[in-house]
Image (cartoon, helix red, strand yellow):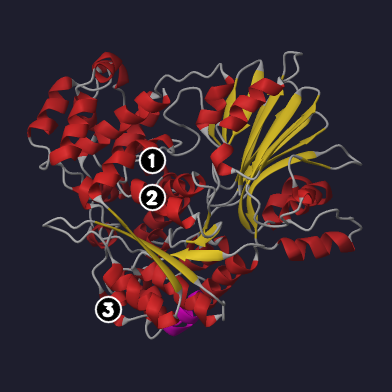
Amino acid sequence: MCGIAGEFRFDGQAPAADTMARMLARLARRGPDAEGQHADGALRLGHRRLAIIDLSPRSAQPMVDAATGAALVFNGTIYNYPELRAELISRGHAFHSDGDTEVILRAWLEWGEACVERLHGMFAFAIRNRDTLFLARDRLGIKPLYFSATPQVFRFASTPQALIAAGGVDTGIDAVALHHLFTLHAVVPAPRTIYQGVRKLAPGATMKVNARGEIAQRSYWSLKAQRPAMPKRAAEWTEAIHESLRQAVKKRIEIADVKVGVLLSGGLDSSLLVALLAEQGVPDLMTFSVGFEDQPEERGSEFEYSDPVAAMYGTRHHKYLIPNAEVLRRLPEAVDAMSEPMFAQDAVAFYLLAEQVSKTVKVVQSGQGADEVFGGYFWYPRMAAETTGSALARFRKHYFDRDHDEFLEMVQSAYRGPDHTGELVAAHLTEPFADEFIDQVLRMDTTMLITDDPVKRVDNMTMAWGLEARVPFLDHQLVELAAAMPPELKLASEGKHVLKEIARGLIPDAVIDRKKGYFPMPALKYVRGEFLDFMRDILDSHACRARGLYNRAYVDTLLAAPEQHHTRIQGSKLWHLALLEFWLQKHG
């Protein structure tokens, strides 16, 4: 797990070492263990290392093949690298290191662009060979890959901030991305970002850039949500998912030369991970939980659920209780760590938890993805119950943060246009190879929406502390199997039925049968007191007014009744506005 960067010039100039140094400085927290650069003519590659596999200098990056001159920078983990390494050795390749980095390089030398289809894991990487740059991103977009392109230069990096540090990036607001941001609770699907001059490679895609600056992209993976030709009984589906999840968890604990822990929230998903790891005999299992002060309306921690799981399996459990005053004080740091704006208020919780966990381990498993893959959110059954209207109408009614008319009311005239998000979602929901409407919804959530919400959030907040987060529920083989399962096996039992069946007897019934919860953040959930003052100061600031983004009448309406304006999935509309403005003030 690392930070990567590169510069490919088309104007006859050589990429400068100091430009790369500025980019790498913005990636330092992602890779605190080492830094490296490699220059060859029109191309310069940079890398910040978090050493997880093969801790020796032999796996340092950029990695260069002496015979061909091919050079690689890589961020992520390849879980099947031992098998690929053995196959490549049988094909005549000689290895000089013991990690997964060299396996990618030699897989590319052996199979070319098709190498990505053999990689099982999370990754973003770039390989330069002769006058071509090849880039790739994993199937579910767990690892980020941003780029900027002009007629003079192409740059890529793990964060937009690294690209901006290099200079020459148009940081104006992308009006289409803005529409997505405020409709899909901060999700801006690839290739767009909130910046006009920064784009991101889509999940499951590759890109080639040649010496003339010509760019070609292709998708190498897509998800089908169709029933198999030979129907399975419910018990067969349960056993198949159970075994696939076992394997996903096992891979993510075995492939590391450092200790691996678990972020234990007290919910079904992370508790099940603990049970499956214990089931496989993992010694000295470490678990980590965070909690906050209570509010009159809500408990601030889930320790009552996480403690019994830790006790049941005898884990070395770590609990952190964060005062509410600390949450607001540290919020600006969490916003600094956001590569793109993130509306979810639990971002600061993950940031503060990751800070503590990173003092003990360098790798953790986390439960992100289970709700999207296995239908755990309350809006899925509501969508399924809709029997009339288009797929877009059924989805919009229960999911969009704002309808298009409200968006037009919110922004000033320069940012008004057609219903970009409606068009995008309608196109995704009508893609082929999905049997039912809910199959279409879950597939879109898993392959597009999740990438730029919980997955990106966890990557940003853990990597801000040099902590690698692994997400077994987003193992692509498990995702493919789950996508073929009948929706009723997901939506039953108020969601995630199949996971609840697997968990029965492995974790306490109280954890399985509890009402679906969300990371409790009372200090940021209730729009009052210091939190309200914080948002009012941001939205009334000179910078916000001068930006000319929001319609002041809309802002004043929200400020007049801050706890009365919520999205369909219970987000604070006022927080959305304040967060984007605060992020823009900190990130330009």
Q: Who's the residue at 16% across and 27% down the image?
A: 555
Question: Which label is found at residue 510?
Answer: 3
Nearer to us: label 3 or label 2: 2
Q: Residues within 10 Å of mark 3 (few under 14, many from 20)?
A: few
Q: Who's the residue at 39% across and 57% down the image?
A: 442
Instruction: Find out whether residue 301 is within the magenta segment.
Output: no
For marks 3 and 1 on the same chain, the one whose residue lies earlier in the sequence? 1
Residue carrying label 1: 334
Horizontal and vertical percent position of residue 522: 21, 52
For marks 2 and 1 on the same chain, the one whose residue lies earlier in the sequence? 1
Residue 392 visible in the displayed image: yes
Q: Is residue 25 left or right of residue 516?
A: right
Q: Is residue 209 left or right of residue 417?
A: right
Question: Which label is found at residue 352?
Answer: 2
Q: Is residue 222 above or below residue 472?
A: above
Q: CA distance from mark 2 to mark 1?
A: 8 Å
SS for dot 1: helix
What type is the residue that disc 3 sits on? Ala
**Start and end of the magenta stretch?**
231-242
Q: Is residue 324 left or right of residue 229?
A: left
What type is the residue that disc 1 sits on? Ala
Nearer to us: label 3 or label 1: 1
Q: CA distance from mark 3 to mark 2?
A: 27 Å
Q: Is residue 522 above or below residue 502?
A: above
